[in-house]
Image: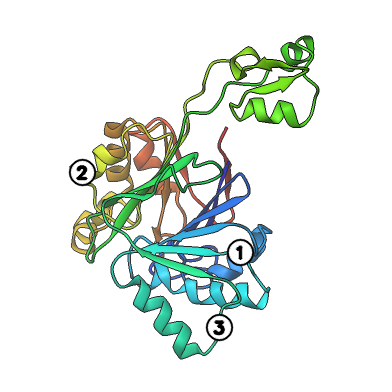
Amino acid sequence: MRILFLGTSAAQPTASRGLSCTCIERNGEIIMFDAGECAQTAYAKTGLGWNKRMRILITHLHGDHCIGILGLLQTMSMQRRTEPLEIFGPAGIEEFVTANIRMLGFAPTFPITIGTVSPGAVVGHGDGGRGGDYEILACRASHTIAAFSYVLREKNRPGRFNEENAAKLGIPRGRLWGLLQEGREVVVDGKTFRPEQVLGEERPGKVIGISGDTMPSAELEEFFAGCDYLIFDATFLDGEQQRAAETRHSTASQAASLAKSAGAKNLILTHFSARYRDDAGHLAEARRIHPCVTAAADRMEIRVA
């Protein structure tokens, strides 16, 4: 699994930062959070491909977080995409997408399903990933319009595969090894082998939080508890706390305080105001509070082990 940052600026693009867009790639599936203007351009540069299983989750209906959906849909159609696409967002997302498709006068080459988000499960274990191995949950954010934050939570993963044990047991390399790694029993010459015979201890699944645009809140602190990676709004520095409160955004230190209280292992700052020439100030303020802070940059990639 890896996290790819396609756009990390707030409200308006800069020479080095595009508008909000973050992708999680896992098991050949793309899960995109927000799609600011020109998201299709940033996506094309990743080389991820246009015909993969994909979900897009929108935090709120401000232009810098959703306008890019339209370009994505057009580009996907021009690339002759056939895989279904799921889009989720606050109330109004279906009207926004369908009205613009109609007004722009193009017909997607692939099925599109649009769902309205409410607090709780958006994607459940029964319909998430391969074999339902993850879920996506939503929580209300504290912004100027209806907005949501999201958590992607994996199921616990099987332990590491012991090739030496499998060979000693006489289990042929190949498909049967793969089935055991998936936690399924296999039969060889009439003898049944169980996953625990070749797998180590079960490993906890990863938890990734995405704040979208928000002020800190007690509800979000609880929602993001124990995240392995927390991607959080850091629009302003402490000198602009009043502006942050007026616009319902966070400062870097507020993001760090929430992450620390929530027990998030890694904090990734994003959504930087164009007024700042670099992210050095954001990092300095946040690192005074949280021990593990990274500033997101466009086309930055984080591999999740």
Q: Which residue is mark 3?
A: 107
Q: In what element is the residue under mark 1?
A: loop
Which of the 4 image quarters holds residue 113?
A: bottom left
Is residue 282 in sight in this rendering?
yes
Residue toward you, 280 or 49: 49
* The N terminus: image quadrant: top right
Q: Residues within 10 Å of mark 3 (few under 14, many from 20)?
A: few
Q: Which residue is mark 2?
A: 219
Disc 2 and disc 1: Cα gap in Å? 36 Å
Q: In what element is the residue under mark 3?
A: loop
Q: Amino acid at mark 2?
A: Glu
Q: Which mark is residue 83?
A: 1
Disc 3 and disc 1: Cα gap in Å? 15 Å
Residues at discs 3 and 1 in contact (Cβ within 8 Å): no
Disc 3 and disc 2: Cα gap in Å? 41 Å
Q: Residues within 10 Å of mark 2 (few under 14, many from 20)?
A: few
Place of residue 280 in the rendered image (x, y in percent of width and height, measured from the top left): 45, 47
